[in-house]
Image (spheres, grey):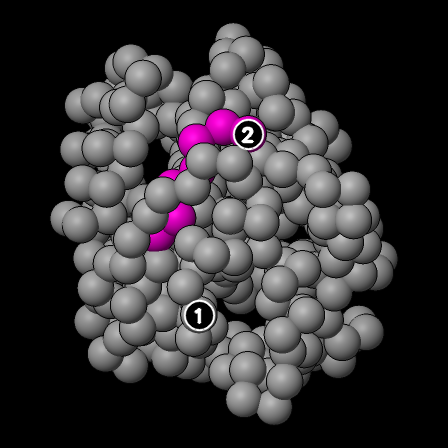
Amino acid sequence: MADLPELFPGFETRMVEGEGATLHVRIGGEGMPLVLVHGYPECGVMWHKLASELSRHFTCIIPDLRGYGQSSVPKSEKGLAYSKRAMGNDIAAMMTRLGHQTFALAGHDRGARVAYRLGLDHPDRLSRLAVLDILPTYDYWRQMNLEYGLKMYHWLFLAQPTPLPENLIARASTFYLEHTLASWTANGNLSAFDKRALEHYRAFFSDPERIHAACEDYRAGAGIDMDIDTADRAAGKTIDVPLLVLWGGRGLSPDKNPLDVWRDWATAVEGQAVDGGHFLPEENPEATTAALISFFKQS
């Protein structure tokens, strides 16, 4: 993937060991370390519209999750290597190797699931946490019904046993990718996405190993991730660092106030809707950047 366009001028790129995976990481800026974690079906490139401004305030550390982008692809069955606990452990190990014991963390979509899991599993590592356009996995599955199942059909489709979704996606990977991206935006098209970023998304999404990894991510969501979330809810476990919740006013969150849901999971919750669909950093980078800076600059 060496010929892909560069969207992070002034940032350095490293390969950093996680915990069982090698992560492709972009690093730039100065100040408090802020990790930015992407979601599906993207990679770390999704933060490119925010990176320049955020790097004026923070040392931005932007990994590709295991199996995504240009990171390594651990072998997996039934989602076990792609649990959000395993992915969160990658991030924690990466930050240890980069010399940061404590850091702030923002995640979008699947990356937000990694982020809140890390907050529950490693409470001593985070200073602040932000999640973009999700509810906890537990709450999504608990409210799955006809209407929501049609809206979130990919949760059910991608979690099917291998190789069904892998084979179907591989036969028209660009169509599937672009349909997914467009259908989750407020405008229903690809106009929010930089053409150079789309080159990155198409490149990794055309790789059969990475298609499988993304399916394993969702199999984990329907299996081990749900089991871990359910155990934490039963135990009353909470995130005890300040939590910012942002969601698209026309995004994928259900028709309930996300703040009410997150207050069952965290002790200090604030947040707001951002105009746009699911892909806040690309559909409305100005408002998303402003909200993140305001939150993470607080002591």
Q: Residues within 10 Å of mark 2 (few under 14, many from 20)?
A: some
User: What is the number of the mark on residue 240?
Assistant: 2
* Quarter location, residue 110: bottom right
Q: Secondary structure at mark 2?
A: loop
278 in relation to 39, above or below: below
- Would you name the residue on which mark 1 appears? 256
Q: Which residues are magenta?
A: 240-246
Structural distance between the alpha carbons of marks 1 and 2? 23 Å
Which quadrant would residue 221 be assigned to in this image?
bottom right
Q: Position of residue 291 (x, y in %)?
A: 23, 42
- Is residue 191 or residue 220 the one in the foreground? 220
Q: Is residue 288 left or right of residue 213?
A: left
Q: Is residue 46 left or right of residue 190?
A: right
Q: Which mark is residue 151?
A: none
Q: What amino acid is labelled 2 in the image?
A: Asp
Element under disc 1: loop
- Between residue 73 and residue 120, name the one nearer to us: 120
Q: Which is more N-terminal, label 2 or label 1?
A: 2
Q: Quadrant of the C terminus?
A: top left
Look at the picture and state if 275 lies above or below 299: below
Instruction: Depth check: give the residue in front, 273 or 48.
Output: 273
- Residue 33: x %, y % from top left: 39, 19
Q: Is 186 part of what is drawn in magenta?
A: no
Task: Please tell me which residue is depicted at 22% across the width and 22% down the height of the picture.
Answer: 57
**Kind of residue indicated by mark 1:** Lys
